[in-house]
Image (tube, helix red, strand yellow):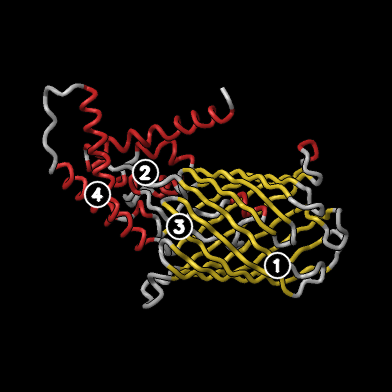
Amino acid sequence: MSARQALFFLLMVLLSPAVSAQAQSAQNPSTFTLGDGTVDLAVPESPAFGALGLTPEQVSRPTTARELAMSFINGVDRSGNLQTGIAIDTAPYMLLAGSRITLRDYQQPGQYLTRFLARWQVSFASAKGGGEDDPSAKIALGMRFTLWDRGDPRMDAMLLGCLTREAARVLSSQSPVSPAASDEEIAIENRRREELVREGARPCREEAARRRWNRSAWIAGLAPTWTSADGTAPQLDYSGTALWTSLGFGFENVPMLEDQAMLSLYLKSRSGEIVPDQLAPGSFIDQDNVTIGVRFIVGSPTSQFNLETLWVRNDRVDLRDDRYWNLAFGFEQRLINNMWLNLSFGRQLARDASASEFSVISAFNWGLGER
């Protein structure tokens, strides 16, 4: 079995409970599970990519985790070096138990632990420098914890009610299956009904996305990292751990902003980072850093523009003063269902440890979507 076939088999095993859950809820609208509450919101930034500083926007936006997501990045990083990479993210509890937990139970007041576990995100990222000045390879293992989330569509009682009504309406309009039907004919009819229920529920999910895409939330994360200066596996060394938190304010009850804007405040600390030394091309230097940032987002559930500003303090081992600002402008656009393009343009300002650099980072993000 090839590696590609093995990966496909693993994905099918992981996703099979979700498929069976879809069939169950199509037959019984009162048993909608967590997967049925999935809404096509922007795919969250990968915690592992965030630790490596390779997300298009550095200020993480609090948003609901996907069961499974992949991100591909390409561009010039904030040190002026070419970077390419891939990240895989998952919500383990959602994959393993999401098909056995109903939305009704999930929304109960005493289910904080269940909601905390369902929102827990784990990720792995790998990136490679693409230029002569930075042949390094980097990997990170990240975890993100959602401490509070007013944007979780699975907590939307209006969505659950709409799904139930639409499923009942669709199924009540169907003629009973003939008692003489074969097992194959019954299976075909069940799949047809599932598709009708899924299509009938689409307006419910779109309306939930409009209600939830920019709600207030609070996340925190951590990610250990490893770096190989020459890009080879034997030279991989531990290169510190990133810790961060982000608080998003959705302007609830503020006219003109409530439905179309969000403000995120961000704090990140990174120890033992190994980076190319811009003052000595071809060599690397260790540093600790602190990043404080603000990101303003405006738009809709499917198209968002953002502006962010960061203040960065790098404590280099050579004690060279390295304090600077970074300004960036970007946008995020849904291309097709569950496929998003994210693009950011930025520039460093007032930096002494290297020339101010432009950055252009793009990412394609795919997330497991609605059932």
Quarter location, residue 349: bottom right
Q: Identify the residue at horizontal 86%, vertical 53% (top origin).
A: 283
Tell me the amino acid under the disc marked 4. Answer: Gly
**339 to the left or right of 75:** left
Q: Which of marks 4 and 3 is nearer the N terminus?
A: 4
Secondary structure state at the residue bearing disc 1:
strand
Furthest residue to the bottom? 255
Q: Which of marks 4 and 2 is nearer the N terminus?
A: 2
**315 to the left or right of 184:** right
Q: Where is residue 210 in the image (x, y as percent from the top left)?
A: 35, 63
- In the rendered structure, find residue 334 and report the number of the disc placed on it: 3
- Vertical placement of residue 106 versus 352, above or below: above
Query: Badge 1, how many Cα within 10 Å: few under 14, some, many 20+?
Result: some
Tell me the amino acid under the disc marked 3. Answer: Arg
**Image quarter in which the N terminus is found:** top right
Q: Position of residue 219 (x, y in %)?
A: 52, 57
Q: Which of marks 1 and 2 is nearer the N terminus?
A: 2
Q: Which of marks 2 and 3 is nearer the N terminus?
A: 2
Mark 3 and mark 2 in contact (Cβ < 8 Å)? no
For mark 1, what is the residue?
358
Question: What is the distance, in whole Å, between disc 1 and disc 4 at their CAs?
Answer: 47 Å
Tell me the amino acid under the disc marked 1. Answer: Phe
Q: Nearer the viewer, mark 1 or mark 2?
A: 1
Number of callouts: 4
Q: Nearer the viewer, mark 4 or mark 2?
A: 4
**Image quarter in which the C terminus is found:** top left
For mark 2, what is the residue?
35
Q: Earlier in the sequence, mark 1 or mark 3?
A: 3
Quarter location, residue 236: top right
Question: What is the distance, in whole Å, between disc 1 and disc 2 at their CAs?
Answer: 41 Å
For mark 4, what is the residue?
200
Q: Nearer the viewer, mark 2 or mark 3?
A: 3
